[in-house]
Image: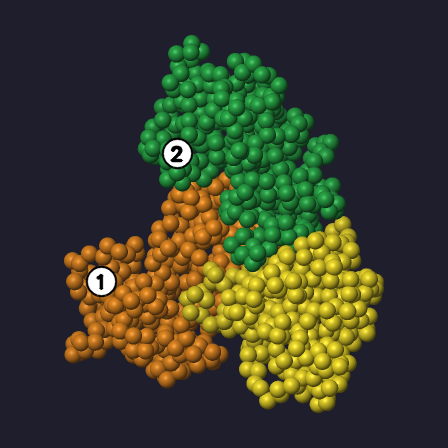
Chain colours: A green, B yellow, C orange
Amino acid sequence: MPTTTWNRHHVLSLADFTAAEYDTVLQTAASFQEVLSRRTKKVPTLQGQVVANLFFEPSTRTRSSFELAAKRLSADTLNFAAATSSMTKGETILDTAKTYLAMGTDIMVVRHREAGVPNAIAQEMDRLGVRVSVLNAGDGQHEHPSQALLDLFTICSLIDPNHPRLELLKGKKIAIVGDILHSRVARSNIWSFIASGAELHLAAPPTLLPKLFAEYILEESGEEDAGTQGHWDAENEEDTGTKGHNNVVGKNENLSASPHPPLSASSSQLFLHWQLEPALQDADFVMTLRLQKERMTAHLLPSLREYHQLFGITTTKLQLCKPNVKVLHPGPVNRGVEISSELMDDPEFSLIQSQVTSGVAVRMALLYLLGSGKA
Amino acid sequence: MPTTTWNRHHVLSLADFTAAEYDTVLQTAASFQEVLSRRTKKVPTLQGQVVANLFFEPSTRTRSSFELAAKRLSADTLNFAAATSSMTKGETILDTAKTYLAMGTDIMVVRHREAGVPNAIAQEMDRLGVRVSVLNAGDGQHEHPSQALLDLFTICSLIDPNHPRLELLKGKKIAIVGDILHSRVARSNIWSFIASGAELHLAAPPTLLPKLFAEYILEESGEEDAGTQGHWDAENEEDTGTKGHNNVVGKNENLSASPHPPLSASSSQLFLHWQLEPALQDADFVMTLRLQKERMTAHLLPSLREYHQLFGITTTKLQLCKPNVKVLHPGPVNRGVEISSELMDDPEFSLIQSQVTSGVAVRMALLYLLGSGKA
Amino acid sequence: MPTTTWNRHHVLSLADFTAAEYDTVLQTAASFQEVLSRRTKKVPTLQGQVVANLFFEPSTRTRSSFELAAKRLSADTLNFAAATSSMTKGETILDTAKTYLAMGTDIMVVRHREAGVPNAIAQEMDRLGVRVSVLNAGDGQHEHPSQALLDLFTICSLIDPNHPRLELLKGKKIAIVGDILHSRVARSNIWSFIASGAELHLAAPPTLLPKLFAEYILEESGEEDAGTQGHWDAENEEDTGTKGHNNVVGKNENLSASPHPPLSASSSQLFLHWQLEPALQDADFVMTLRLQKERMTAHLLPSLREYHQLFGITTTKLQLCKPNVKVLHPGPVNRGVEISSELMDDPEFSLIQSQVTSGVAVRMALLYLLGSGKA
């Protein structure tokens, strides 16, 4: 493992991650990726430590990834699933967490459908003065930092497998396409990609990427000249001369729903589009997001067919991108909706399997960094 | 580990536990508590043995505690959850147990909503002449011995951390407050606290602690002079001169619901109250029980608010107790019902977190004592 | 472990198992049975490997058996249960399998209510050129090979514990009784018992063993003279002179429901009956199948009572068999339906517990044979 100066007790959000922290995670994950290629894929690093997966919101994929990461570090794991738990008996979430603390848990991996729950648990642990670490495995529409870190690792490892690092993305064009408004994955991705110096393009229908979103994430970024810092591309405003780029307006509207803190993006890094094409144009990486089908019933979308036509990623549409463009998706995929079935399975373009593999290495890295100083 | 003369094959009830057995569990748990404070919290004691958690009634807290205890002894664990099991296919409970026996299970940890199920499984194992041990993890309204043992260990360890033993409780006043009638935890606690020589005070509304209960547990105790052995304190009978203490009456009523065997309590040890105050007066320890909210719909209680006012434990009410009184609760807690939220979180008084920690050590001790002679 | 020439990547069906493969499984299982009798029941064979139990159809019994087998080989296990999975989110089964592949799974144990799912996953793994093995743990009404192999091992070990092998069953009379039409266990059993050279008698009511079934499994067996290859015993046709044996008729009917390939049975090996008695007559082994109670609602059966009377196995009916006859059942058992409660618990006749024990050894053998060449 690389020697690092990691001082973080919890991983709750990427909003305040430093470049050094990103690089530490990337380097540590690269070391574990190497371990995973050996005959014996286990290391004794966390032997005797307990990793509790507190999944108040059910998830098989993410829970299995964390569980396997913990086991490969030789930790013992406890799985808490909300369905069969005493949550139904009226116990509070903090009480549940404190119960697992008292049992001897060293690291809590927390998923909850409400934003802020992992944060609240971490604060409680700190208040109690205990050394337990909390790792956010997805909270509401807030953040999913381990997913964004594995995305980052997947891309950086592709560019330089031996020495993945943040600066490799500097100047790369990355498009995030889909239901950005409701995506905790996208929120975490935005922090890491902006930190890398990449040029980030968000594309979605207006109902899934309202102007308010742009305004909110750019708010207090220190650059009040919206014309240089935020870029907006709206279907009916293409006569502005700066095709696809529009100023952020409506600053006095209120965005009460989002727990997202303001972003310090440099002026030329973040672009928002209500059309797919300008986001794809010359992109190096395209990340398409899972579409929650319940958005349909909420009348935020006309039909899955129309969504796929407008925002679904296909081999044909990729022709707008750089020739060696790669496509990512956090999974699980709705084939034929956010991405064509053919493209998803095309190893020339798809990094989707690679993301899952990276996930184990990145989660081993996070558990290692949080846990190695403990016992 | 201390050398002991432990001969018990199953832990089903504390009704026939000897003082030597209590002390063996306490001493063994103290040894494991020390193991749990080391850097590496695992011991190889039960390597290769299989602990099957047969939870016919779902439970996250107790199951996690047993699972962690087993893993820290290096046993392999199997989790059986009724919901996804072949119970729905009509297999009998004994057949399920025999299937886990045939797979090679060494210790079965059994929870069931019907009283007597762990007992029936243990009898079947004995009948078959196999060396499998059964540990009752809660059966109906009967017993929950590991919970009572961890309560005992929590209190005794507080008094003498290095040498917790039963006699430390001699003469201490312990109050158990709440739904005693329906509580398997209370039933197990009564055995251990009486065995310790403590003075035990039970307090609850009449619907949750009927006279019949007192009569039943005192029946055949060998001391028929009720005036000296059982003490009853009823709201409308305070003019008896012996405030708070009343004779047990109505011996000819039938208590068909309870599987509880008679108790051999000495004359001055067990007191029952329909009011909280006499139980709290000068108490050393107060154990408050979880209130099952379904008792409300069964019209056994007027309202949660009124219950809390009359029987909920608060910092104010604790002023009746000894100055260094401690409060216990088996969890999960209904904050603001059986205990005030403020008190629950007050480390000066609350032993609730300490109970959970003790739980792992005590369960390691029980698994060790049952399993070490096996393989 | 015996040195073998095992070349199989997947275990999906017994239809194409060779005698050498059967004997390799039997011998390897015998070695592990010996390991399981030692003090330390674990071997480090699969350390660092990951066995994922992908149970799209819930099962506690079979999943526990595979999980324990994997743990005793020191593999890490991941449990996937459909109920809490992203299957509800619309992900395809192959995508789920590929996710577990990408996480680093070495062996997938797959159960699904649809026939062919394990096969489809195996084909996908082969198409991708990866070394992952797939083990069918029951697919629809198709096959359940590990169950049939443990049945085979149970019987052969009884005859020669030190050297269980296929040829031990040559000439033995084995009766399979019950809902053969819908049983994946029976389908796998038919392959292995026929391969062994045993004389196999299937007995069931006409609705659960239609002539079409016989026709189908005998089709293309290379022996078109039905009078010598297939034998049929129908209730209303006992005046044929060959009591209990009847020719297969109705070849032009279509059997669209069954995924079962044709069987190469020699002419004197397979007999079908609509009555129990001729199947039991002089039998060495009787295997009775679980009756799915939903067959009743589908009007395939008159009543459980009548079924038990006609096809339920009892001590009395066993008097038709060889004196040392043994009874098997794949479990879970409906006591008093397919087998009498008394007989099930009679150690003189019942091999049911022995089957469960064999299950762990046989599954260790399969995981070992599939996994040992990997890492």
Residue B93 visible at all: yes
Identified by mark 1, the residue type is: Leu
Q: Nearer the viewer, residue A140 or A319?
A: A140
Q: Nearer the viewer, residue B21 or B149?
A: B149
Please state the total of marks drawn on the protein image: 2
Determine whether A100 is above or below A164 in the image. Answer: below
Residue at the spot 63% in from the left edge and 43% down from the top edge? A120
Q: State the residue position of label 1.
A: C212
Q: Nearer the viewer, residue B350 or C301?
A: B350
Q: Residue furthest front?
A: B239
Residue at the spot 63% in from the left edge and 56% down from the top edge? B335
Q: State the residue position of label 2.
A: A300
Judge left or right: residue A240 versus residue A195: left
State which quadrant residue C243 falls in.
Answer: bottom left
Determine whether A270 is above or below A135 in the image. Answer: above
Image spot of residue C363 (x, y percent): 50, 58
Badge 2 crowding class, 10 Å Cα cut-off, few under 14, some 14 to 19, many 20 or more, is few
Image spot of residue B257 (x, y percent): 55, 79
Residue under disc 2 on the same chain as residue under disc 1: no
Identified by mark 2, the residue type is: Leu
Residue at the spot 23% in from the left edge and 57% down from the top edge? C255
Please state the chain letter of the residue tagged with numbered disc 2 in the rendered image.
Answer: A
Residue B35 visible at all: no
Q: In front: mark 2 or mark 1?
A: 2
